[in-house]
Amino acid sequence: RKRAEEAEARRKAEELKRLKELEEAEQKAAANSQAAEYAAAKQEEAKKKQLEVEVAAKMLGEIESMIQALEEDADLEEAVQKAGGVKALIAMAQKHTDSALVQAQFAGVLR
């Protein structure tokens, strides 16, 4: 009878150990899932920011070209107004201070 009780106690201990291991595995899987979701969100955010930078750089480049073309016609004010005005150009450059491309395009517009 004592051996049966010991065997039953060992069996219960093993079962508890397996349940604990399963619980830990589920917690790790949940943590990995959250980490993957976070990484995907960060990647999407980076793509969005890159697209915004590309759009701003393209627009500033087009404005610079327009200004250079209009310099010959001495109609710089019109080019700036078509771009939304000086404040719009400054705001665009300020929004992307970490982008060398945007800052270079902005500097070109200022020339």
Image: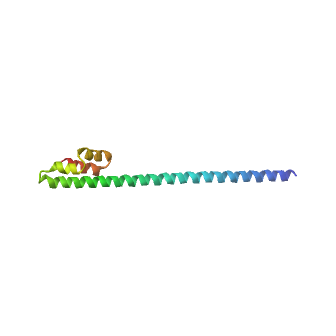
Q: Quadrant of residue 62?
A: bottom left
Left or right: where 36 falls relative to 56: right
Which residue does the image show at 61% across and 53% down from the upper left? 26
Q: Nearer the viewer, residue 68 or 84?
A: 84
| Image point (29%, 52%), residue name | 56
The colour mode here is rainbow
Q: How many marks?
A: 0
In the picture, measured across the screen, residue 30 lies left or right of residue 69, that is right
- Where residue 54 sits, quadrant-wise, is bottom left
Rendered location of residue 97, percent (x, y)? 31, 46
Q: Position of residue 45 (x, y in %)?
A: 41, 52
Q: Position of residue 86 (x, y in %)?
A: 23, 45
Residue drawn at x 25%, y 44% as measured from the top left: 87
Residue 68 in view in this figure? yes
In the image, residue 66 lies at what x, y percent? 19, 55
Whether residue 108 is visible here, answered yes or no, is no
Residue at 73% from the left image edge and 53% from the top image edge: 15
Q: Nearer the viewer, residue 18 or 54?
A: 54
Farthest residue, direction right:
1
Front one among 68 and 73 = 73
